[in-house]
Amino acid sequence: MSPALATLDWNHAWDWFNDAPIRVVATIVAAVALRWVLHRVVSRAIALAISQGDRDKQGRAGRVLAHAAGWDVERHRQRLSTLGTLLRSIITFVVAGVAILTVMSLVGIPLAPLLASAGVGGVALGFGAQSLVKDFLSGIFMIMEDQYGVGDVVDVGEVVGTVEDVSLRITTLRDANGVTWHVRNGEILRVGNKSQGWAQILVDLPVSYDADVEAALTALDRVAAAFAGDPAWSDKVLEAPTVLGVESISGNALTLRMLAKCISGEEFGVQRELRRRGKAALDEAGISGPSPLAIPPGTGGVR
């Protein structure tokens, strides 16, 4: 028998093996099991919230109102999935950190100096990475509050554009000129979302000063009623357009105004269609447009 084996205290070795390694293994197994259980709970909660949201939005009226309030089903799913991923990452980080510290304590590594050094380093990192922490926290709250999502047209102060990507640190926008903007979430102090909720549009139709106003308004009332009952457009408006009446009077024209509420993103199409139908209805009723201003003789239109 070798001298090393002869001097080995087998009882002490067995006690050590029976104590620390088993506790280490038990800690790791418990951490893995706890992480799996918590991830399972988060996944089930997210799936339940998504299915509940899908059931709440069934039916044409429900879909229109849901879209009008910014509760699009696919967007709802994306937001909940992002929150689920964030929660699972936090759970993994916390469980792994506690497990590592527990294992280090079991094998006899002193934690006090390590925690003191980590505290000093954390303070230094906190001062140096304030903007980074601010960006991440702002991104978390933006996602949780559903302030905007991919595809929305937003005004963040410095730029107005379509959201192409939202992460915890950066929001990517593309403006009307095709320029891509990468905006840090911590620098966004206000957000104007032009795609969330409903939009209100105004349609002005000028007619001749001498036109029959009552006949013109009656024709536009028929247009509003027919528009709300048209299957091609009824899912895009929240209610029948309203004929407000005479908006303004100028030297040679009266301006008639219509108002409509529609789901966001459809306002330009609804506005163009109402203007086209209003023009056709006024022509059919014999209501002419304003005549051009007369130019005094000899001026040639130039002063």
Image: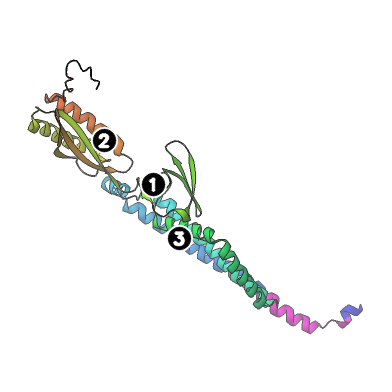
Q: Position of residue 135 (x, y in %)?
A: 50, 57
Residue 242 position by quadrant: top left
Mark 2 element type: helix
193 and 30: which is toward the camera: 193
The residue drawn where x is 51% and y is 62% is: 39
Q: Position of residue 259 (x, y in %)?
A: 20, 40
* Dot 2 or dot 3, earlier in sequence: 3
Main secondary-structure element of the magenta-colored stretch: helix
The residue drawn where x is 56% and y is 67% is: 94
Q: Which residue is mark 3?
A: 44
Quadrant of the snapshot with the N terminus? bottom right
- Tell me if residue 130 can be seen: yes
Label 1 crowd bin: few (<14), some (14–19), many (20+), radius 10 Å: some
The residue range painted magenta reads 6-22
Q: Which residue is mark 1?
A: 155
Q: Position of residue 270 (x, y in %)?
A: 27, 36
Q: Nearer the viewer, mark 1 or mark 2?
A: 1
Mark 3 element type: helix
